[in-house]
Image (spheres, rainbow, N blue to C red):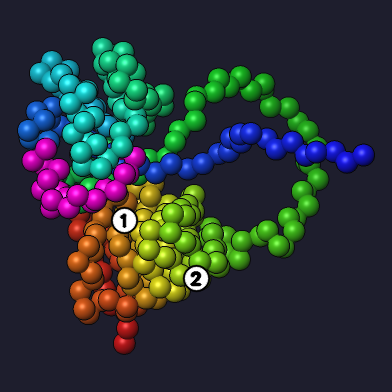
Amino acid sequence: MSKTQVRNPVEVKIATVVAVAVILRETDLTIIDAALRQLTGGVDDYFDGEFAVIDVGALDSVSHSVDWSALIALLKSCKLNPVAVRNARPDMQQAIVAHGLSLESVVSPRQPAATEGAGQLDLLEETPEPVAVKPEPAPVEAPAPAPAPAPAPAIQPAKPGSMIVDTPVRAGQRVYARGCDLVVTAAVNNGAEIIADGSIHVYAPLRGRALAGASGDASARIFAMNMEAELVSIAGTYRTFESGLPKELARKMVQVSLDGDRIDLHCMNP
């Protein structure tokens, strides 16, 4: 008698979520609207539905109050999708939740404000809920444990600290190299996104988005054998190419680095 296999109706897996951080220093919607229009250059799909985390840590608790409904509507009009609020004061939290936004439960200490201007993105990874940890007992002498068996060669990285992808990264796919460099030996297609906490090396055409130094490493770089990218970013500072790359860089071997608050691209072809 054959048994009918029952398919699990839902699966929950760990996923990395990358979002734009909208850092508010003003609550006047007219000023915010003008700043966003200047940033996007009037391009309707500049953000194209990106998730957004609203950071209110720079607001003065006395002189600033937030009209959440109007702010959310403004961000959505710019094709940003607000999902959470960072650094919210206690008096804000009830209104934030009532508007369907999440509160960040773990907040890292704020860094000094970056130079103001267009081209600043923060990359955010979902932070797990804090877990209570029992104090460890006093150390006791114990025999040294036997060395663990070496992992099978098939799952060892070719180089420590690197993640290697040797299949094409297709439109809609996102690859994240957590805590290491990313090496891609196949094409990164339009609409794909590759992210690394370290540097990114693409030994094939790079046509999608490449975001290096995702955890804030400003020394990270991007190397592309054939540069055709839609967007490149180092440590949150980014540059887009809606009108295409400069002729001297298009389809050439290019290195991308961060110089202060400016993205530099250098042709490496002889």
How far across and down, in percent of the image, does residue 66 sit? 18, 21
Quadrant of the rendered structure where residue 57 is?
Answer: top left
Task: Residue under label 2, please give it.
Answer: 186
Task: Residue under label 1, please give it.
Answer: 234
Please state the extent of the stretch shown in magenta in the rendering: 33-52
Quadrant of the rendered structure where residue 27 is?
Answer: top left
Give the mark nearest the N terminus, 1 or 2: 2
How far across and down, in percent of the image, does residue 254 sit? 32, 74
| Amino acid found under the numbered disc labelled 2 | Ala
Who is closer to the viewer here, 121 or 43? Answer: 43
| Amino acid found under the numbered disc labelled 1 | Ile
Query: In this rendering, would 54 be left or right of 223?
Result: left
The residue drawn where x is 23% and y is 29% is 72
The residue drawn where x is 21% and y is 23% is 69
Can residue 34 be found in the magenta stretch? yes
The quarter in which the N terminus is drawn is top right
How far across and down, in percent of the image, does residue 160 sit? 57, 60
Who is closer to the viewer here, 80 or 94? Answer: 80
The residue drawn where x is 21% and y is 31% is 73
The residue drawn where x is 68% and y is 35% is 8
**Image position of 146 with respect to 242: above or below:** above
Who is closer to the viewer here, 94 or 156? Answer: 94
Report the Cα–Cα distance between label 1 and label 2. 21 Å
